[in-house]
Image (cartoon, rainbow, N blue to C red):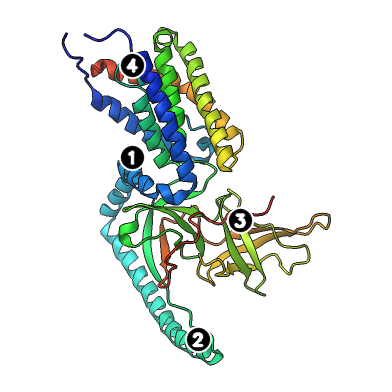
């Protein structure tokens, strides 16, 4: 049996750096509340597309980087992303064949799960934020999923990432 | 050949371990000082991402600086010269005043105010999440920045440093809802606490009784109590005082004097006699209910 050859790690890495950059990019005031969870979407994509190599640990590390970039407790996003990576891994065979709008639904639920965890942890650590802070990113993430999916799939295919 | 299935138990086990690790991290991070080195390391590791974000604007600045016309530069130079002269003249007066002030203080038998030393830092990132007002500065532990250091701009107090990594530091602004600072009314020395609201142009003083002597237009300056901020720096101007006698406290709003949303360069005040051990790593928590 020939060893499994992984290719295109640099593409995965670059997409994650890009997603992290988008997550802290300054936005006009009107759009800030709508900022989608770019990192979460990227993690979901790579977990579903390359489940052999992108798993819980990579998701967790992405979350940890996000924690370092945002304010909030260290480990907060890491926990959420590890959980989302895990669920995406479990579901990847089913969700991969869904039409795009159904995938958007799945993304909606996963991002909502992440936001619930944030509400919970924020509540524990004693700072509360208005509910729209959690709801709007969920909506915008689901709406933008087809775009993210198409771009990442194009990158994966044209650059031969397995 | 690829294995057909992912090994199930391994993913479960990994998730379990990572959840435990995350929860440990969060609990330790609540008591901030334990996680400081980890956070500092991670901040250094994510420096490229911040750099990437800052790249377009810094490139833009560089381009416009490089291609400014000679005429424009000459005009600017002239204007700066004039300004410089003006400031020179004012400074001479200031020196005299400072000496006079020191002499008067000596006469009064009070301790002389220590001259504070400042470090200029530039803002590299901001707005990490919409309802917390924090910014990242390009100076860190290597430049002598320490936690709790006061940050000002040309007009007034802006905030204080809360995290320090070797090359960068994070500061909390006075408008952050979690931030409070001790102030006094410049006119009569009335002491109070100014809390952030999350809005960029409003602080509130919610612990003043209805009969407190505070008026619209009063200047609030730092009182120096609490040991974080040096005394006597301007903070805000009172914009609104609502006295409702049904409520125990007056409702006082103030507008920060510092250009909180638009300052790109800030000054960090280094105090020669900084406390060796910080009593609390976190900014003072809000005590009153809104």
For the residues beneath circles 3 and 4, the answer to whether they share a chain is no
| Farthest left residue in view | A2
- Residue under label 2: B101
In the image: residue B149, left or right of residue B81: right
Q: Which mark is on residue A51?
A: 4
Q: Earlier in the sequence, mark 1 or mark 2?
A: 1
Cα–Cα span, label 3 and label 1: 32 Å
Alpha carbon separation for disc pair 1 and 2: 49 Å
* Residue A151 appears in view: no
- Same chain under badges 3 and 1? The reply is yes
Residue at mark 3 to residue at mark 2: CA–CA distance:
32 Å
**Measured Cα–Cα span from mark 3 to mark 4:** 48 Å
B143 and B64: which one is in front?
A: B143
**Mark 4–mark 2 distance (CA, rounded to whole Å):** 72 Å
Callout 2: 10 Å neighbours few (<14), some, many (20+)? some
Q: In the structure shown, which secondary structural element does the residue marked by tag 2 occupy?
A: helix
Q: Assign a secondary structure to mark 4.
A: loop
């Amino acid at each position: 049996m020939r060893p499994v050859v992984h290719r295109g790690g640099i593409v995965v890495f670059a997409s994650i750096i890009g997603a992290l950059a988008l997550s802290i990019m300054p936005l006009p005031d009107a759009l800030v509340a709508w900022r989608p969870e770019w990192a979460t979407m990227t993690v979901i994509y790579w977990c579903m597309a390359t489940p052999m190599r992108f798993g819980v640990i990579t998701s967790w590390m992405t979350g940890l980087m996000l924690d370092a970039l945002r304010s909030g407790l260290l480990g907060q996003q890491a926990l959420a992303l590890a959980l989302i990576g895990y669920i995406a891994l479990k579901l990847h065979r089913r969700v991969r064949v869904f039409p795009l709008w159904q995938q958007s639904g799945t993304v909606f639920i996963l991002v909502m799960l992440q936001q619930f965890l944030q509400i919970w942890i924020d509540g524990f650590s004693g700072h509360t934020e208005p509910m729209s802070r959690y709801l709007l990113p969920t909506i915008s993430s689901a709406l933008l999923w087809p775009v993210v999916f198409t771009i990442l799939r194009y990158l994966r295919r044209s650059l031969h990432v397995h | 050949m690829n294995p057909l299935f992912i090994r199930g138990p391994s993913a479960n086990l990994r998730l379990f371990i990572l959840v435990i690790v995350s929860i440990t991290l969060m609990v330790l991070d609540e008591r901030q000082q334990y996680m400081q080195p980890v956070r500092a390391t991670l901040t250094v590791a994510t420096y490229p991402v911040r750099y990437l974000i800052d790249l377009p604007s810094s490139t833009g600045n560089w381009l416009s600086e490089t291609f400014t016309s000679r005429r424009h530069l000459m005009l600017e130079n002239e204007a700066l010269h004039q300004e410089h002269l003006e400031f020179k003249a004012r400074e001479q007066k200031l020196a005299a005043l400072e000496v006079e002030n020191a002499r008067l203080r000596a006469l009064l038998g009070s301790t002389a105010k220590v001259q504070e030393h400042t470090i200029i830092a530039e803002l590299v990132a901001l707005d990490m999440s919409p309802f917390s007002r924090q910014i990242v500065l390009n100076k860190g532990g290597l430049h002598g920045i320490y936690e709790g250091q006061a940050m000002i701009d040309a007009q007034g107090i802006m905030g204080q440093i809360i995290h320090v990594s070797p090359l960068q530091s994070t500061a909390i602004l006075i408008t952050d809802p979690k931030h409070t600072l001790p102030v006094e009314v410049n006119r009569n020395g009335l002491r109070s606490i100014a809390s952030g609201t999350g809005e960029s142009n409003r602080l509130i003083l919610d612990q003043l009784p209805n009969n407190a002597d505070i008026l619209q237009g009063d200047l609030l300056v730092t009182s120096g109590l609490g040991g974080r901020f040096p005394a006597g720096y301007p903070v805000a101007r009172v914009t609104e005082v609502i006295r409702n006698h049904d409520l125990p406290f007056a409702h006082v709003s103030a507008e920060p004097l510092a250009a909180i949303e638009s300052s790109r360069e800030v000054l960090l005040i280094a105090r020669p006699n900084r406390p060796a051990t910080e009593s609390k790593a976190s900014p003072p928590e809000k005590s009153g209910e809104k």
